[in-house]
């Protein structure tokens, strides 16, 4: 039995989209579930759209996600090179081979000539397609006499190589996710296989690379489904065994209509890329999941379930658990709707599983947060106290700001609710009690004592005290806040509030 081998083959034309990461993840899960290999191949022949740094971005993003290739430009392997731009010598021999078959022909049409014939069709209300109906009236080796073809070649006339789509064949195509369906070749056009610079197009290079690298399963987005007929025939033309195909559905916008785009993320306030990406051409920076404080395992868990369901509908799964359960036959045919709220829920769940020290490291990794002036032991206490209240590690610093900075202003609504003529007396008594309290004082009991002594409810003491310590009526239990702030800082904040609000 052949070893399972899959590949993820992105183009370095920009950052890696959410959908691309999911494709790589499903490739990885499938390969590992079958004891196979996961290959990263960079398809960098589109020089016009090439973006400097995009390849490094792709590899860094996969590493952050924990999707580590067995073979890649970085990791090497026995089937390299792993960049298409370095495989020209391999393609050349196969270009010669396919020209010996009846599946390919040379076309000398210039862009101007093709534009003219497109215009001619448009004027008749028709759409031009280079196919079995039109190829015989165009400048190619099918329509021209052999001598004319030889003359044009001798004169070094620029040409492309096109696939000669068979006439009126019904193709029986198979997809692991979508099942079997048929396509008539008359509905397909004669795609360019080799450009006039001698470099193969995606269609031909892709087939050659997958054959050379012994890829057994091709898992890719549904946008490639219309190309399945051509790719199947290319394998036939070369006399090669085709891999099995699985076409993944789209990740949809939150409202469920249309493919999720980077503009959707920018508009609705969530990332669509794994890492931050700065577009030098436009000057725009698009946010990434890493920089937004997502835990890699949470991001991957969320992404895996956008289009696949494990057997028992379990939601929280480690990478090993996903590998153990993954089945391509259980990948959904329908598009998966993106949910920002669900992504945040996953991150919250994973954050709760982190130790306080691990959360501290996540906070340290946030570029816009400096912990230089903050006591680590104090911060660990704050993390322990606030961790369950947040979705992201940096929110601990936002929500717990009052632990490190005394309030300068007090929320007006909170003041109206918590402060009255009796409050200064109550807080003054409380301040004295705190000042005289022992090292292991029970602050809850101390507050209860002041309330009982003055014959008022606990809220009459607790609310203004919280206001004095926090600046508003929020946060964990007041005795816990005092235990982190310490006696001296607690007394200082009570004095500030008395001076400003009395």
Image (tube, rainbow, N blue to C red):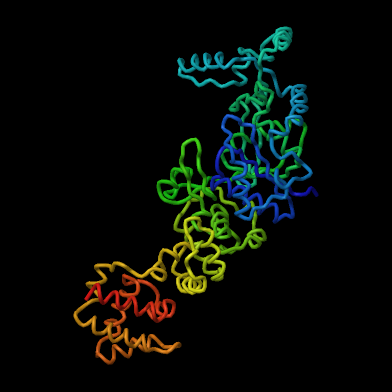
Q: Residue furthest bottom?
A: 453
Number of marks in the rendered image: 0
Residue 202: give x, y in percent of width and height: 64, 32
Residue 480, compared with residue 370, is above or below; it is below
Q: Residue furthest right?
A: 1
Query: Of 379 and 149, which appears nearest the observer?
Result: 379
Q: Residue furthest left?
A: 421
Q: Is residue 155 visible?
A: yes
Which corner quadrant holds the C terminus? bottom left
Residue 309: give x, y in percent of width and height: 57, 57
- Asked whether, in this view, residue 260 is left or right of residue 246, the answer is left
Residue 140: give x, y in percent of width and height: 66, 14
Q: Is residue 166 visible?
A: no
Residue drawn at (29%, 88%), measured in percent from left and top?
Answer: 451
Query: Of 481 and 190, which appears nearest the observer?
Result: 481
Residue 238, compared with residue 451, is above or below; it is above
Snapshot quadrant of residue 147: top right
Residue 183, compared with residue 31, is above or below; it is above
Residue 36: give x, y in percent of width and height: 74, 52
């Amino acid at each position: 039995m052949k070893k399972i081998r899959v590949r993820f083959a992105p183009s370095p034309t920009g950052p890696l989209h959410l959908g691309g990461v999911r494709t790589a993840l499903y490739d990885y899960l499938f390969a590992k579930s079958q004891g196979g290999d996961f290959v990263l191949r960079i398809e960098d022949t589109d020089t016009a759209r090439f973006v400097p740094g995009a390849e490094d971005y792709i590899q860094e993003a996969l590493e952050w996600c924990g999707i580590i290739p067995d073979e890649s430009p970085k990791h090497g392997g026995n089937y390299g090179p792993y960049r298409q731009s370095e495989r020209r010598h391999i393609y050349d021999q196969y270009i010669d081979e396919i020209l010996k078959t009846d599946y390919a022909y040379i076309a000398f049409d210039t862009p101007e000539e093709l534009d003219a014939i497109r215009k001619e069709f448009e004027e008749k209300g028709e759409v031009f397609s280079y196919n079995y109906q039109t190829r015989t009236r165009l400048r190619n080796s099918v329509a021209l006499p052999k001598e004319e073809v030889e003359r044009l070649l001798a004169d070094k006339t620029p040409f492309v190589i096109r696939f000669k789509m068979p006439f009126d064949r019904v193709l029986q195509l198979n997809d692991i996710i979508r099942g079997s369906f048929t396509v008539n070749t008359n509905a397909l056009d004669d795609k360019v296989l080799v450009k006039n610079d001698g470099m193969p197009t995606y269609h031909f290079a892709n087939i050659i690379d997958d054959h050379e690298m012994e890829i057994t399963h091709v898992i890719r987005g549904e946008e490639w489904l219309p190309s399945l007929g051509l790719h199947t025939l290319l394998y036939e033309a070369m006399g090669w065994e085709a891999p099995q195909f699985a076409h993944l559905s789209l990740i949809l916008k939150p409202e469920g209509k249309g493919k999720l785009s980077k503009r959707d993320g920018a508009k609705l306030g969530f990332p669509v890329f794994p890492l931050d990406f700065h577009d030098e051409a436009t000057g725009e920076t698009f946010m990434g999941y890493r920089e937004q404080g997502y835990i890699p395992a949470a991001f991957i868990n969320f992404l895996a379930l956008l289009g696949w369901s494990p057997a028992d509908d379990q939601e929280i799964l480690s990478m090993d658990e996903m590998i153990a359960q993954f089945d391509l036959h259980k990948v959904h045919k329908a598009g998966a709707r993106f949910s920002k709220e669900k992504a945040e829920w996953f991150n919250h769940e994973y954050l709760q599983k982190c130790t306080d020290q691990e959360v501290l490291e996540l906070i340290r990794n946030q570029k816009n947060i400096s912990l230089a002036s903050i006591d680590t032991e104090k911060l660990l206490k704050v993390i322990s106290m606030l961790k369950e209240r947040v979705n992201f590690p940096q929110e601990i610093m936002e929500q717990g700001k009052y632990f490190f900075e005394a309030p300068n202003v007090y929320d007006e609504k909170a003041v109206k609710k918590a402060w009255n003529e009796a409050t200064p007396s109550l807080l003054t008594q409380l301040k004295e009690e705190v000042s005289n309290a022992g090292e292991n004082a029970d602050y809850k009991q101390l507050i209860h004592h002041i309330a009982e002594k003055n014959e008022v409810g606990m809220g009459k003491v607790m609310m203004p005290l919280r206001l004095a310590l926090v600046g508003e009526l929020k946060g964990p239990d007041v005795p816990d806040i005092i235990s982190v702030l310490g006696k001296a800082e607690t007394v200082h904040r009570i004095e500030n509030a008395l001076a400003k609000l009395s």
